[in-house]
């Protein structure tokens, strides 16, 4: 396996045993109940074990290097808890996703995106009065500084909207100086509201710029999702009526993408914020990371794959390619680091795709037919069952977004718009943790050891 140390450099045998309870300093939110004992080269080391409110116990290895002069090794963080959090919980085996204890199914059916934003940020569902105040505040921050419009003209018209969003969101710190001091709780709150409020405006502006249409300003008489659709699809030449079916579907897509534990882009935001970087820079880093096709870019890649497959009779060819070790092709929208049963968001998204396309009278959409048949054949194939590969959140989202009129290039910007609340909620939680330290992983070094410089004439 790449990066694996040669056998002769493999560490000596190390044993970990779970032992009797031992009180040590716990973390702020988890309880210490027992210890694990590591035996290495004849020495034993006690590692505190914390039991969370849900999920696996964790071994606290913070003192291990100082005590045993060894690092743990976990590229990709498959077995590493990088932080303590109370925002979102995923049970990959059971296909469970909770936001502050509420299931994604309940929230998608009974709540709405701005209420989910409040829940993620403040930990509880709002009262009617709290919701009205929050919604009014967000609504009145949806415009961007007029001078930011000049940023867009610097991009080529064929720029990818994600490239524009990374640039413009990072540049927000050049405009909103009164909300970049992370030590000031009020400034943190202002930055939080500004980001949630302005991301739809920036995403819509990126779209309008790439299609050569004039920007459409937000309207305070529209709800969050309707405002976004209006900014994307209305034109000055005629009145535009937001379709309530599409607005409800858009709002549900926002909710399904809002937060997802310590995924790659959220971990990027946390690592960036651990250095004290301002919130706009941290969210721009998250947008950059989300863009990758293995992460948030998968919704665009999935729809392009479904289009390439084109018809159900070509599905076996693509399934064979996905199973071929010598072929880098993967089924986009399939598989997940955590979900090994099913992605509950994909379940809701599939239902929504059926509803929206039927209501729009395009239920026979060929892409949807290919997607459903591909899911059916893949799930019946032992390869996908053995590797626990199921449709993820990105498998059906693109079909709905395409039916709504969005080009594939807008799929990931919509994911970024939705995930901004998750990123900023996790950013807020980390900044407010008095124990926050700068993130600085170590490494397994397998490069050259010290050697003398050789002059060019002697090489
Ligand atoms: C998102 O982390 C999150 O929470 C992310 C996200 C969020 O809300 O933030 O849920 C959003 O990013 C969803 C995932 C979107 N990405 C894709 O759909 C791209 C396609 N899927 C993959 O590339 C892959 O499944 C990952 C990246 C999602 C997960 O990769 P892992 O956990 O590192 O798994 P792996 O690459 O080690 O794969 C395990 C095995 C491998 O085979 P072996 O080497 O063991 O023989 O499964 C195979 C892989 O080859 N495999 C696939 C596959 N995904 C994994 N084979 C074919 N098609 C696939 N899609």
Image: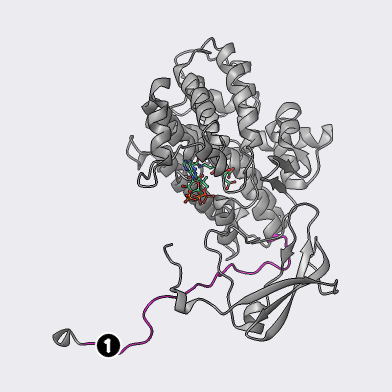
The overriding secondary structure of the stretch rendered in magenta is loop
Can residue 231 be seen at all in this image of the molecule? no
263 vs 36, nearest the viewer = 36
Task: Report the magenta residues as a range.
Answer: 431-454
Q: In the picture shown, does residue 106 fall above or below 354?
A: below
User: Residue 317 location, x and y as percent?
Assistant: 37, 30
Q: In the picture shown, does residue 54 fall above or below 350?
A: below
User: Residue 157 location, x and y as percent?
Assistant: 33, 34
**Occupied quadrant, residue 104:** top right
**Occupied quadrant, residue 116:** top right
Q: How many marks?
A: 1
User: Residue 438 location, x and y as percent?
Assistant: 60, 69
Label 1 Cα crowd, 10 Å radius (few <14 / some 14-19 / many 20+): few
Say what secondary structure mark 1 lies in: loop
| Residue where numbered disc 1 is placed | 453
From this viewpoint, which residue is outermost toward the front?
Answer: 382
From this viewpoint, which residue is outermost toward the top?
Answer: 361
């Amino acid at each position: 396996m790449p990066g694996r140390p040669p056998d002769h450099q493999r560490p000596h045998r190390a044993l970990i045993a779970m032992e009797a309870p031992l009180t040590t300093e716990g973390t702020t939110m988890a309880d210490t109940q027992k210890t694990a004992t590591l035996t290495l080269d004849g020495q034993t080391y006690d590692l505190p074990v914390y039991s969370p409110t849900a999920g696996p116990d964790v071994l606290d290895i913070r003192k291990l290097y100082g005590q045993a002069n060894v690092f743990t090794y976990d590229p990709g963080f498959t077995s590493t808890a990088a932080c303590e959090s109370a925002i979102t919980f995923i049970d990959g085996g059971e296909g469970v996703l909770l936001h502050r204890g509420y299931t994604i199914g309940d929230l998608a059916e009974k709540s709405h995106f701005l209420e989910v934003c409040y829940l993620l940020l403040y930990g509880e569902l709002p009262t009617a009065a709290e919701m009205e105040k929050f919604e009014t505040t967000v609504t009145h921050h949806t415009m961007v500084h007029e001078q930011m419009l000049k940023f867009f003209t610097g991009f080529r018209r064929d720029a990818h909207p994600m490239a524009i969003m990374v640039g413009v969101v990072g540049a927000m710190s050049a405009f909103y100086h009164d909300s970049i001091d992370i030590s000031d709780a009020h400034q943190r709150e202002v930055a939080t509201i500004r980001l949630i409020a302005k991301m739809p405006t920036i995403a819509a502006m990126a779209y309008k710029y790439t299609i050569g249409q004039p920007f459409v300003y937000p309207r305070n008489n529209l709800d969050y999702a309707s405002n976004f659709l209006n900014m994307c699809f209305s034109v000055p030449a005629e009145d535009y009526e937001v379709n309530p079916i599409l607005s409800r579907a858009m709002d549900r897509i926002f909710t399904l993408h809002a937060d997802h534990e310590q995924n790659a882009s959220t971990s990027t935001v946390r690592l960036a914020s651990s250095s004290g970087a301002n919130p706009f820079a941290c969210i721009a880093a998250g947008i950059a990371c989300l863009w990758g096709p293995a992460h948030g870019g998968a919704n665009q890649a999935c729809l392009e794959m479904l289009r390439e497959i084109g018809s159900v009779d070509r599905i076996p060819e693509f399934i064979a390619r996905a199973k071929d070790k010598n072929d880098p092709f993967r089924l986009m929208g399939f598989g997940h680091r955590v979900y090994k049963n099913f992605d509950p968001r994909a379940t809701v998204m599939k239902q929504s795709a059926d509803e929206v396309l039927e209501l729009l009278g395009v239920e026979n959409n060929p892409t949807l037919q290919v997607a459903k048949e591909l899911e059916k054949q893949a799930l019946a194939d032992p390869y996908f069952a053995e590797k626990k590969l199921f449709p993820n959140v990105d498998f059906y989202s693109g079909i709905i977004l395409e039916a709504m009129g969005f080009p594939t290039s807008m799929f990931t910007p919509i994911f970024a718009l939705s995930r901004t609340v998750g990123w900023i909620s996790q950013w807020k939680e980390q900044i407010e943790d008095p124990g926050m330290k700068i993130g600085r992983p170590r490494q397994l070094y397998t490069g050259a050891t010290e050697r003398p410089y050789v002059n060019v004439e002697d090489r």
